[in-house]
Amino acid sequence: MHLIACQYDIQWENRETNFATIREFLKATEIHPGSLIVLPEMFSSGFSMNVDRVAESIPSQAEAFLAEVAKTYQSWTLGGLVFKHSDGFGSNELSVFDPKGELVGHYQKNHCFSYTGESDYYEDGEDILLFDWQGFTVCPTICYDLRFPELFRRGAEAGANLFPVIANWPDTRIDHWVTLLKARAIENQAFTIGVNRVGSDPKFNYPGHSVIFDPYGAQLAIAGTNACCITADVYPETATAWREEFQALEDMKL
């Protein structure tokens, strides 16, 4: 089973340019049918607080793009986008599409980043999303969620063994990013794939470092600071065997 993380310099509030960039990177990447392609948080706009400008219309252009990529590569595709509630607040979400281009589900970020004012413009979600992919049970999360291990425990308790984390994670805290992704993999005996962006926006610089860890905490792939896609072959049996041998999850107290 093939995991693909695509990091690039998201052009500020410019859907079509970002769509074109992703198409070019994916053309240059070996993608096996049935892969899981993961794009960053707010992949078509950047981490904007201008909800009116970046929120998706209905039907959504970003979702149509994700469906197009999924059908083109006969793969699952996951990426972050913004919707607007009737009360004016935004919803920082991700959407997942299957190889037929059909919507699998949405996840709304459970922890908006109050430190940067995200919570002034976006509402926290409450639910998790689980979906099946090639024998995995996948539980995706978004950026600041990574700092809350109890959210990942909810997923693990529900059977998740692969956690994608999509982000716009700035350079000032990049050590936290890699360390916490490794910790979430070890403590949940699960694969993690963290997908960050590179470049800059009006407030922050982003260093990439998209990374994939296995359930033992071994690093399978890591990107540097340049735009690129990284890949890794992963197998659900790896997580199953480790969980059966070392039954730490059986001792959880929730």
Image: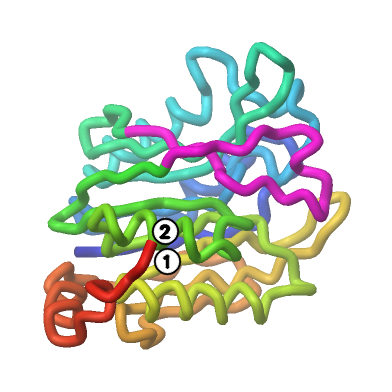
Q: Is residue 116 magenta?
A: yes
| Viewer-proximal residue among 26 and 42 | 42
Residue drawn where x is 36% and y is 42% of the image: 129
Kind of residue sitting beneath label 2? Pro
- The magenta region covers 105-127
Residue drawn where x is 73% and y is 17% of the image: 88
Q: Looking at the rendering, in which quadrant would you find the C terminus?
A: bottom left
**Which of the two discs, 2 and 1, labels the residue nearer the N terminus?**
2
Residue drawn where x is 32% and y is 29% of the image: 103
Q: Secondary structure at mark 1?
A: strand
The part of the image, by quadrant, that contains residue 206 is bottom right
Q: Check residue 164 in the rendering and tell me which mark sits there, or answer none.
A: 2
The part of the image, by quadrant, that contains residue 227 is bottom right
| Viewer-proximal residue among 189 and 28 | 189
Q: Check residue 47 in the rendering and tell me which mark sits there, or answer none.
A: none
Residue farthest to the right, as pictured: 202
Kind of residue sitting beneath label 1? Ile
Q: Secondary structure at mark 2?
A: strand
Q: Identify the residue under disc 1.
A: 193
Q: Looking at the rendering, in which quadrant would you find the N terminus?
A: bottom left
* Rendering coords of residue 99 (x, y %): 23, 39
